[in-house]
Image (cartoon, helix red, strand yellow):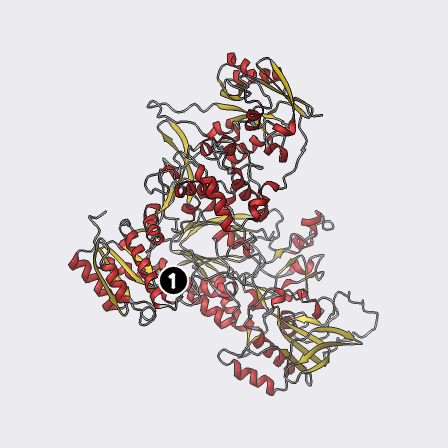
């Protein structure tokens, strides 16, 4: 306590937001009459410079030692007013806010009721303010290094930006190569740049950058600590290939007994690889990996006389004794860029994906169009699951025919409550337009139709591109197909043209499903490690949808790319650059402030039950043994650097032994009592 | 045929072995009471005290309470508390208190020796007192088939079990202790199930009716705190309701403060109460405390498929969260 409370009360009009519904003058007069209130004023915008000046001048001239601001939610302007208090030499935690906007003027219509409620809220805040305590804001040093999880285009861009700024970057990627989904794409909308041409230089850069430690085929196993000081444990899975010796020549892959017998993930299962493989020619690092499950030697213990890959490898890089390696390091900030999964089209059984060979997903179509794909960029009819007939002597190989008509279906797994995805995946309209264009380009005279609900061409150059594609003769039909079935050689798309209200059956050779982007199926791994939240669509949740789109609720952890929500490449890159910049702020300043409104334990009252330890989402509480007058007992102790002041522990403590500063029972109870008393 | 289960000689022999051990400081069991048919807790520290130990269907007390509720006076400088093991006799229902106490880290499994008593039902002392208002005792109670035999003051009388058995025993699902080091008799198979019939009426009442019902019950409370003190799960060093700053509840005995007390008590036991029924047993004002506890118990079981005091490895209910948790009760 800094002497008898001298409270200043400031009531904001918020333009008309509050003043329209609440009689601010009446509230001011009421507050002025309450005990310990030295001054009560109202002003049109308390958060403005002159508004804040009212407070700072009163603190100096009237010797205020408590300030109550009745305005909007503390989430909006608590920091603003805390700074004002600090600027006037008063501890910022002597501020209490009464929310008379979101919780009063905005939700009431009757002026007299709203005014009376505002009075109560103000009286309640005044009552609490008497019990406030000065808190000390501590600072901790920041490790000048960042961890990036995921090396798709978002992770790559984040890593490059941070590394270029001179900070150390640890880039961890689950698969054997960097590049992510963008590496699988052929051309990019709306400019039709070759995806590989713009991506591979960046892939090479992350592989070579002196400030980037690249861990591919690796997984983050454990993260502890807090902003500025995260301890990270990464498991580097064994490739059974000595990275230092492998030259990437590919002799091993040719020699592998399984060569051409395992479906290649990179080609969405349409191409073939061996048990030792490079995902695609431009992979970074250009080092081979042995697929443990598929390798005969590793899974069955026997590969002929001896493993052929090891025999073929001139530098002797193949080594079956290499084990997983655990790497530990410290970082100051973390960027999650873990990406997305494409929607599983089998969840829409009416479209016959997995039943009919030539119902393909858009990502499969992307590989068909790509020059590096399984067909060398030729769009051909598919015969899946059939083994190639051995060529008879002298027989000419019949090249597979090209489809005469291709039909695209949009919004597969997006904007669809029946599969639980209400959101728009944002990229499908445009990639469909692009793929329709590529089909027209590659197959002369092909008939291309698109079934759509709405076309969302919102980005730079999108509408122009969509217009161009339609002028190229792509037939857009507004309607959501109900079924796909086979009639003779043809696939039949059953739909209704909703513009003319005509039911139709549309015959086609190939159907491309514009599958949406979904949250990754393994998203829980990262959620559990970093305590991230999810939005209702199950993508990772940002701290604020508008003003903090790359931050998370946890300081020092940021989001980039499609792990937060579906995005196209420019948006993903923009967010990556934003996340990089956000992650560099603490590193550049070298110090971060830690939460002052932390929890504290009254050890004498603690019964050591550990509820708080389990409840704490930040692992900030542990049980320690203490000697209490000869009795050895375990009691809870809070690591104040880790505590984020969420108060969950205090709510869960049965004996009231753990309390959150600024929200102690002794502070809240007077607040509640005022609210409970009827006039 | 339901029979007397515990062989007293065997009990004494085991107790003697246990208390003779160097790493055991105390054995908590039952001995004859001083009046009527009551049994009372026995705190055995010496082999010489073993002779008074006994187990009869009158052993209703849940002795788990004494593992957590004890005074901790300051010890002489430089000395620390005796950390040797405590042995305790528990029935099936009581054993769940031990499990829940361990879930809440009150002590470790190694700190206790659990002498498990498979049990086929105990008497309800209140019912017995009504049946034998004149009995001075100390008397003896035995189970014989479907009857209890009461002998005191030179008289013996046989009463059908159903008339005097404790209510909780008629819905007992765990007659054999869920945790023990030594079982003092062969396991008893489950003979009953819990259908929550006793609280069906309470659940049907509207909120006004409920208030009226509880107002009448709470208005009787004399705030002796017996229900809190006997509860094996109420063992905070300083009960939050005793605190003066902040003072959540005033000392006065009136309907407002009594209600605050009972509601807080019930809430603090949500997801923790193991249904031993001791609170209601000790209430001198016949407040049906278990109705609140059982409503919570039922809700916890239905909403979260969680049953406190059945698994020492389980996390406390209120400290765990799953995204699949039922939340349709949230407005």
Work out whether residue B163 can be spotted. yes
A247 over A501 or under it: above or below: above
Please state the horizontal and vertical placement of residue A302, each as a whole percent of the image. Answer: 72, 48
Q: Quadrant of residue B96?
A: top right
Residue that sits furthest to the left in the current view: A61
Residue that appears at 71% across and 66% down: A354
Q: Which residue occupies the foreground of this view, A639 or A544?
A: A544
Query: How many numbered tags mark residues here?
Result: 1
Question: What residue is shown with label 1?
Answer: A103
**Above or below, comparing residue B131 to residue A504 in the picture:** above
Asked where in the image residue A549 lies, by quadrant, the reply is bottom left
**Which of the pair B210/A457 is nearer the observer?**
B210
Could you tell me if residue B265 is visible in this image?
no
Q: Position of residue A240 (x, y in %)?
A: 61, 51
Q: Quadrant of residue A359?
A: bottom right
In the rendered view, does A191 fall on the left or right side of B251?
right
B4 to the left or right of A94: right
User: Residue A662, how many percent across, how many down?
Assistant: 32, 50
Q: Quadrant of the C terminus of chain A?
A: bottom left
Element assignment for label 1: helix
Neighbour class for label 1 at 10 Å: few (<14), some, many (≥20)?
A: some
Residue in view at x 53 percent, y 82 percent: A463
Farthest residue in the right direction? Answer: A393
Q: Picture coordinates of residue A677 (x, y %)?
A: 34, 52
Chain label for disc 1: A
């Amino acid at each position: 306590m800094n002497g008898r409370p001298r409270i200043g009360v400031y009531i904001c009009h918020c333009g008309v937001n509050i003043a329209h519904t609440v009689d601010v003058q009446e509230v001011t007069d009421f507050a002025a009459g309450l005990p310990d209130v030295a001054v009560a004023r109202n002003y049109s915008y308390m958060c403005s410079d002159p508004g804040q000046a009212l407070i700072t001048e009163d603190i100096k001239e009237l010797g205020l030692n408590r300030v109550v601001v009745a305005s909007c939610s503390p989430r909006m302007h608590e920091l603003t007013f805390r700074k004002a208090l600090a600027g006037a030499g008063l501890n910022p935690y002597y501020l209490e806010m009464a929310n008379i906007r979101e919780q009063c003027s905005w939700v009431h219509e009757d002026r007299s009721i709203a005014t009376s409620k505002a009075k109560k809220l103000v009286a309640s805040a005044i009552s609490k303010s008497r019990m406030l305590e000065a808190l000390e804001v501590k600072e901790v040093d920041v490790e000048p290094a960042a961890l990036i999880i995921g090396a798709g285009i978002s992770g790559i861009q984040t890593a490059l930006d941070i590394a270029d700024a001179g900070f150390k970057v640890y880039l961890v990627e689950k698969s054997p190569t960097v590049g992510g989904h963008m590496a699988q794409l052929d051309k990019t909308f709306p400019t039709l740049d070759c995806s590989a041409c713009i991506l591979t230089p960046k892939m090479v850069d992350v592989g070579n950058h002196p400030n980037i430690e690249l861990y591919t085929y690796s997984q983050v196993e454990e993260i502890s600590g807090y902003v500025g000081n995260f301890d990270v444990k990464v498991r580097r899975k064994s490739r059974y290939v000595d990275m230092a010796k492998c030259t990437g020549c590919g002799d091993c892959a040719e020699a592998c007994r399984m060569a051409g017998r395992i479906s290649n993930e990179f080609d969405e299962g349409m191409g073939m690889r061996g048990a030792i493989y490079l995902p695609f020619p431009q992979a970074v690092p250009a080092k081979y990996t042995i697929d443990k499950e598929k390798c005969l030697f590793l899974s069955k213990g026997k590969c002929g006389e001896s493993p052929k890959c090891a025999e073929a490898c001139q530098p002797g890089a193949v080594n079956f004794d290499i084990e997983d390696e655990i790497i530990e390091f410290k970082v100051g900030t973390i960027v999650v860029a873990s990406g997305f999964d494409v929607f599983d089209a089998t969840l829409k059984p009416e479209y016959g994906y997995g039943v009919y060979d030539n119902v393909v997903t858009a990502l499969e179509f992307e590989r068909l169009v790509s020059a590096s794909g399984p067909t060398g960029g030729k769009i051909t009819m598919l015969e899946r699951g059939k083994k190639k007939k051995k060529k008879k002597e002298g027989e000419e190989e019949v090249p597979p025919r090209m489809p005469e008509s291709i039909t695209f279906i949009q919004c597969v797994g997006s904007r669809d409550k029946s599969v639980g995805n209400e959101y728009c995946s944002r990229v499908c309209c445009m990639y469909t337009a692009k793929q329709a264009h590529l089909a027209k380009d590659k197959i002369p005279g092909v008939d291309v139709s698109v079934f759509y609900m709405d076309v969302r061409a919102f980005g730079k150059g999108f509408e122009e591109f969509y217009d161009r594609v339609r002028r190229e003769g792509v037939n857009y039909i507004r309607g959501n197909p109900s079924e796909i079935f086979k009639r003779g050689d043809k696939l039949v798309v059953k739909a209704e043209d909703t513009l003319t209200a005509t039911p139709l059956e549309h015959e086609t050779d190939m159907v491309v499903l514009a599958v949406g982007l979904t949250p990754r199926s393994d998203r829980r791994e990262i959620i559990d490690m970093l305590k991230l939240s999810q939005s209702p669509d199950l993508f990772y949740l940002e701290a604020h949808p508008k003003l903090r789109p790359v931050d998370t609720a946890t300081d020092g952890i940021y989001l980039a790319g499609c792990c937060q929500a579906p995005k196209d490449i420019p948006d993903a890159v923009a967010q990556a650059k934003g996340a990089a910049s956000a992650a560099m702020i603490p590193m550049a300043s070298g110090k971060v402030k830690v939460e002052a409104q932390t929890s504290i334990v009254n050890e004498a009252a603690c019964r050591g039950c550990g509820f708080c330890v389990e409840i704490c989402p930040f692992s900030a509480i542990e049980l320690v043994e203490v000697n209490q007058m000869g009795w050895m007992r375990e009691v809870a102790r809070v690591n104040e650097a880790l505590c984020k002041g969420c108060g969950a522990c205090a709510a869960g403590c049965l004996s009231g032994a753990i309390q959150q500063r600024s929200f102690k029972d002794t502070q809240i109870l007077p607040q509640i009592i005022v609210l409970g008393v009827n006039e | 045929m339901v029979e007397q289960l515990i062989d007293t000689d065997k009990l004494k022999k085991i107790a003697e072995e246990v208390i003779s051990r160097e790493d055991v400081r105390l054995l908590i069991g039952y001995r004859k009471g001083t009046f009527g048919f009551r049994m009372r807790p026995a705190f055995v520290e010496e082999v010489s005290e073993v002779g008074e130990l006994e187990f009869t269907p009158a052993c209703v007390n849940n002795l788990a309470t004494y593992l957590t509720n004890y005074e901790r006076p300051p010890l002489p400088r430089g000395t620390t508390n005796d950390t040797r093991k405590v042995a305790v006799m528990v029935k099936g229902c009581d054993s769940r208190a031990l499990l829940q106490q361990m879930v809440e880290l009150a002590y470790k499994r190694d700190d206790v020796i659990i002498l498990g008593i498979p049990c086929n039902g105990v008497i309800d002392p209140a019912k017995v007192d009504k049946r034998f208002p004149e009995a001075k005792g100390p008397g003896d109670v035995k189970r014989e088939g479907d009857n209890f035999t009461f002998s005191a003051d030179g008289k013996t009388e046989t009463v059908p079990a159903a008339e005097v058995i404790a209510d909780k025993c008629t819905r007992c699902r765990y007659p054999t202790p869920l945790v023990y080091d030594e079982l003092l008799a062969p396991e008893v198979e489950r003979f009953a199930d819990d259908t929550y019939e006793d609280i069906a009426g309470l659940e049907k009442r509207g909120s006004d009716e409920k208030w009226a019902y509880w107002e009448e019950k709470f208005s009787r409370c004399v705030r002796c705190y017996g229900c809190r003190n006997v509860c094996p799960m109420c063992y905070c060093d300083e009960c939050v309701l005793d605190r003066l700053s902040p003072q959540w509840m005033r000392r006065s005995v009136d309907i407002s403060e009594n209600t605050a007390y009972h509601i807080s008590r019930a809430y603090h036991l949500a997801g923790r109460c193991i249904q031993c029924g001791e609170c209601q047993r000790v209430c001198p004002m016949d407040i049906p405390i278990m109705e609140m506890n059982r409503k919570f118990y039922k809700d916890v079981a239905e909403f979260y498929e969680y049953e406190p005091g059945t698994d020492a490895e389980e996390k406390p209910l209120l400290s765990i969260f799953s995204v699949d948790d039922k939340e349709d009760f949230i407005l």
